[in-house]
Image (tube, rainbow, N blue to C red):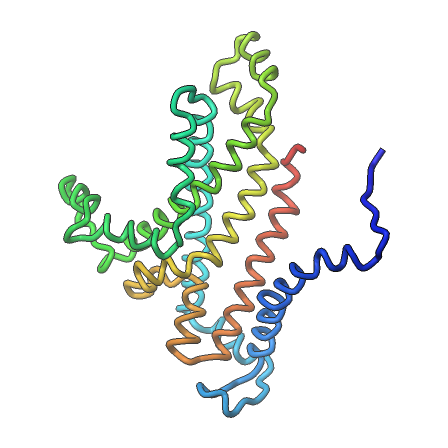
Amino acid sequence: MEKRVTFRNLLVPYLLVAAQLAVTLVFFIWPAAQAVRQSVISEDAFGLSQHFVWLDNFKRLFGDPLYLHSIEISLLFSAAVAGISMATGLLFATAADRVLRGAALYKTMLVWPYALAPAIAGVLWLLLFNPTIGILAYALHRLGYGWNQLLNGNDAMVLIIVAAAWKQVSYNFLFFLAGLQAIPRSLVEAAAIDGARPLKRFWTIVFPLLSPTSFFLLVVNLVYAFFDTFGLVHATTEGGPAQATAILVFKVYRDGVIGLDLGGSAAQSVVLMVIVGLLTVVQFRFIEKRVVY
């Protein structure tokens, strides 16, 4: 029988959620409404004059080949970051679930990168891949590959993907480890007694039981890649070279703050919200069908 919490005073539950509702309203709902409003007006850089232009900002936006290119590289970037960070986090969680000695140290070391801000993570990897002094760039040069993210757009994209995925691995690791530890050992042991090899046990028993965790992390990682990687891109490539890494969230900043195209920037932010919303709907509509709770 389901138990429900009851309050004698009807105002108590509303007071308990008032702080969270206020934060959501001030930092999420109100800015989103302001972006929608500004996307249908034309305003000068100083905000002294403005007039209603309907959907002209959106028409101009989708007629710009650079913006369409930004959408393409954003989808590539988000898919790569989500895939690499989730696969690596699952690999480390599987290893941590088996470690007997030094397990606490192993887990602590894996969690540390999540404490870093995206911009700091970007700077760390920028130093490692620096064409002049970077250790990884030097190793690639020794292998015959002339790495230079300042001139090669593909190198720059690989740099921000690696940095963003590395930053998110710790988050995925924590959730996958919790999911693995929640799986009854008796199921895995029974499969082992029946002769199933470790890889077979993982794909037929362990991984299906992790489907709720995997689905949750897929949504979170895609949202992270679309919204929370601005600082990383700004600190590493600044959208270059030749706008090869100008993902949507960075292009909103560059066109609005640097280019002073306030209406176009607001329209971009609205499109970004719509894209992420559509991706989330698609995930819940199709991918969740494969999730077993």
Q: Measuring from the top left, give residue 59's x and y in whole percent.
A: 53, 76
Q: Judge left or right: residue 44 versus residue 289.
A: left
Relative depth, front residue between 283 and 230: 230
Question: Quadrant location of the N terminus?
Answer: top right
Q: Judge left or right: residue 6 versus residue 174.
A: right
Total numbered labels placed on residues in the image: 0
Residue at (47, 25) in percent of width and height: 97
Farthest front residue? Answer: 8
Q: Is residue 263 above or below residue 65?
A: below
Please say whether residue 80 is visible from this viewpoint.
no
Residue at (39, 50) in percent of width and height: 116
Question: Quadrant location of the C terminus?
Answer: top right
Q: Is residue 51 above or below residue 210?
A: below
Q: Measuring from the top left, give residue 49's x and y in whole percent.
A: 52, 92
Q: Measuring from the top left, give residue 196's x and y in whole percent.
A: 52, 12
Relative depth, front residue between 21 and 150: 21
Residue at (41, 76) in percent of width and height: 257
Q: Measuring from the top left, give residue 144's x and y in whole percent.
A: 15, 42
Q: Judge left or right: residue 169 versus residue 14.
A: left
Q: Is residue 32 above or below residue 289?
A: below
Q: Residue 138 occupies which quadrant of the picture?
A: top left
Please say whether residue 234 is visible from this viewpoint.
yes
Q: Is residue 211 above or below residue 119?
A: above
Q: Residue 255 occupies which quadrant of the picture?
A: bottom left
Residue at (13, 41) in percent of width and height: 142
